[in-house]
Image: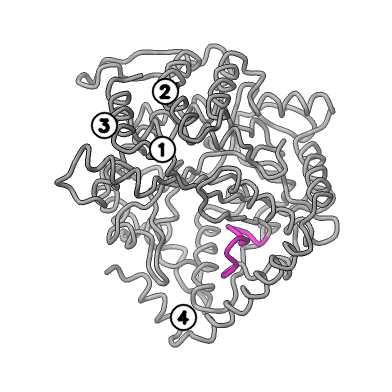
């Protein structure tokens, strides 16, 4: 453990013993609806699940078939996962006959772009913007790569923590500026070390061949209609997943909030020639929101984002500029196909410790040189992280740009776990929950034996059943479906869930009826930065 991390923890807990209890979390879990043969669903979003525009817990992401389930912000991991499980139960009970909630991050069987319906959000101005934005993604990148799914983990520390840390370290800076700066410290360390999450929790070493849709690749045959890499952990996060050539030119800075906002702002205001060729409105139909490199800042994909809840009609970049960072969103996590809800308690406990370590440890600014190494280490892990001879590269001396060291992934992983041990011990004391220590213990065992990783377990289970990816995931999805149906909500819980869905339709109608300007005027106003 670094001296900086140890001192911060000791000083913080001396001042405020309850500081580490003040953690807030939420989960956004994506997943495709698939039919009984493992093909992407062609049906409308189920009416019983409510309006995708206004329901607080159930919406869609890119496509009509890509569900997204959202938990409330919780102070308890168990409550958060119970909320998610209850929402799953309601969804499973209201899927069309024969459909399942796909358990894997890589999609079910696809039949090219036409098989992926763009999500609909009603005819209000707000709903129309969401749909047109997704049409823009379709024209820019195609639909297939946006059929992948994952778990987004939202994390923040509460006022008790921030007030104590602020008093210890920087009383002259405003509390909100201090929060934003410290969250960016977390983000920098996360980017340096997130390859460890890919090794420990990556669960997409293979994919159904229909995902490639004729694209060139370097994958190997790994089963019936299945392609992959023997040592891969997360093809979802590789170059085959969510990626595009236009965004590769972006140099988004994660060192400070102001530089992050300025570089992101530029990307949302600089026209891109290839997108100008697409056009904005052709034959009376919108194809995209604008022709800039990014239509809106959410189009920029990264494994972690600083976030602030935006007001109605406010863009995310405006919310961050006006009120600073409120929480961070981890976006690189695969679905765990062995879990009925895609995420297990062990992962959540590990993330608490990992993210706190990222936040409290030393976090030097990232140079352009180190940025390149970060990307290389991440790519090496997602493509061959389980290879016993997988080496990563790090800069040992931050004062020298040429002091590189090749280190085995496993050995660097052990060092990070050692750094995290004191945080885990203090979390056990603060929460009275031994699962924090158990999560680190299991992570250590997984570094020692790669067969314990979810990616390896998936390959083993496929081989045991002699099935390809799509058939194996379909089996798992059907098992989860039946398990959650058997658990079922209580009659009272079911009535409450139904009332939420009914209210969401009323809320969507109210939005539609409140529109006082044309979509053209609304869009122009929305895209005007102020």
Which SS class for mark 1?
Answer: helix
Mark closer to the chain start, 1 or 3: 1
Tag on residue 422?
2
Q: Is residue 63 magenta?
A: yes
Which SS class for mark 2?
Answer: helix
> What residue sits 34% from the left and 61% below the top?
319
Q: Quadrant of residue 185?
A: top left
Q: Residues within 10 Å of mark 4 (few under 14, many from 20)?
A: some
Task: Report the quarter where the C terminus lies.
Answer: bottom left
Rendering coords of residue 525 (x, y %): 35, 76
Q: What range is drawn magenta here?
A: 53-64
Which SS class for mark 4?
Answer: helix
Mark closer to the chain start, 1 or 4: 1
Q: Residues within 10 Å of mark 2 (few under 14, many from 20)?
A: some
Q: CA distance from mark 2 to mark 4?
A: 54 Å
Q: Are marks 2 and 4 in contact (CB under 8 Å)?
A: no
Question: Which of the pair 323/162 is nearer the observer?
Answer: 162
Mark closer to the chain start, 2 or 3: 3
Name the residue carrying label 3. 367
Q: CA distance from mark 3 to mark 4?
A: 43 Å
Rendering coords of residue 498 (x, y %): 71, 69
> What residue sits 72% from the left and 35% below the top?
338
Name the residue carrying label 1. 20
For residue 382, side relative to residue 228 (left or right): left
Question: Against 319, is 392 above or below?
Answer: above
Name the residue carrying label 4. 519
Question: Against 353, is 103 above or below?
Answer: below
Q: CA distance from mark 2 to mark 3?
A: 29 Å
Viewer can see residue 243: yes
Mark closer to the chain start, 2 or 4: 2
Q: Are marks 2 and 3 in contact (CB under 8 Å)?
A: no
């Amino acid at each position: 453990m670094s001296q900086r991390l140890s001192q911060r923890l000791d000083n913080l807990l001396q001042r405020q013993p309850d500081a580490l209890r003040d953690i807030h979390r939420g989960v956004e879990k994506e997943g495709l609806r698939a039919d009984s043969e493992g093909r992407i669903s062609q049906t409308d979003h189920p009416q019983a699940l409510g309006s995708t525009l206004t329901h607080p817990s159930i919406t869609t992401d890119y496509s009509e078939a890509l569900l997204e389930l959202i938990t409330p912000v919780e102070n308890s991991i168990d409550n958060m996962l119970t909320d998610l499980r209850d929402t799953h139960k309601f969804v499973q009970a209201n899927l069309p006959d024969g459909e399942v909630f796909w358990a894997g991050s890589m999609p079910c069987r696809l039949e090219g772009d036409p098989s992926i319906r763009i999500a609909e959000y009603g005819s209000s101005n707000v709903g129309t913007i969401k749909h047109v934005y997704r049409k823009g993604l379709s024209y820019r990148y195609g639909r297939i790569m946006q059929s992948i799914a994952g778990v987004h983990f939202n994390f923040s520390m509460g006022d008790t923590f921030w007030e104590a840390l602020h008093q210890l370290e920087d009383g002259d800076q405003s509390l909100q500026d201090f929060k934003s700066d410290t969250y960016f410290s977390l983000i920098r360390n996360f980017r340096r070390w997130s390859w460890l999450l890919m090794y420990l929790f990556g669960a997409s070493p293979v994919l159904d061949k229909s995902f490639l849709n004729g694209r060139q690749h370097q994958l190997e045959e790994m089963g019936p209609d299945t392609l992959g890499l023997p040592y891969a952990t997360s093809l979802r996060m590789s170059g085959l997943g969510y990626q595009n050539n236009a965004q590769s030119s972006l140099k988004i800075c994660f060192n400070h909030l102001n530089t992050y906002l300025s570089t992101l702002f530029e990307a949302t205001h600089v026209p891109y020639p290839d997108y100008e060729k697409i056009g904005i409105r052709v034959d009376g139909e919108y194809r995209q929101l604008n022709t800039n490199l990014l239509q809106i800042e959410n189009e920029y994909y990264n494994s972690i984002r600083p976030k602030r809840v935006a007001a109605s009609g406010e863009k995310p970049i405006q919310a961050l500029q006006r009120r600073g960072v409120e929480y961070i969103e981890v976006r690189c996590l695969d679905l765990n196909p062995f879990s009925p809800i895609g995420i297990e308690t062990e992962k959540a406990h590990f993330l608490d410790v990992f993210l706190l370590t990222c936040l409290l440890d030393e976090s030097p600014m990232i140079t352009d040189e180190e940025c390149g190494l970060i990307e290389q280490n991440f790519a090496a892990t997602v493509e061959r992280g389980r290879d016993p001879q997988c080496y990563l590269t790090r800069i040992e001396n931050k004062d020298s740009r040429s002091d590189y060291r090749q280190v085995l992934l496993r050995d660097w992983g052990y060092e990070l776990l050692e750094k995290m041990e004191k945080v885990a011990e203090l979390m056990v004391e603060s929460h009275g929950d031994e699962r924090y220590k158990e999560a680190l213990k299991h992570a250590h065992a997984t570094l020692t034996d790669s067969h314990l990783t979810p990616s390896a377990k998936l390959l083993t289970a496929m081989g045991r059943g002699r099935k390809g990816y799509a058939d194996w995931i379909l089996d798992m999805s059907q098992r989860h479906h039946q398990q959650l149906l058997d658990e079922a909500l209580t009659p009272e819980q079911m009535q409450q869930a139904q009332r939420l869905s009914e209210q969401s339709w009323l809320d969507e109608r109210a939005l539609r009826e409140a529109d006082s300007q044309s979509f053209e005027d609304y869009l122009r106003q929305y895209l005007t930065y102020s």
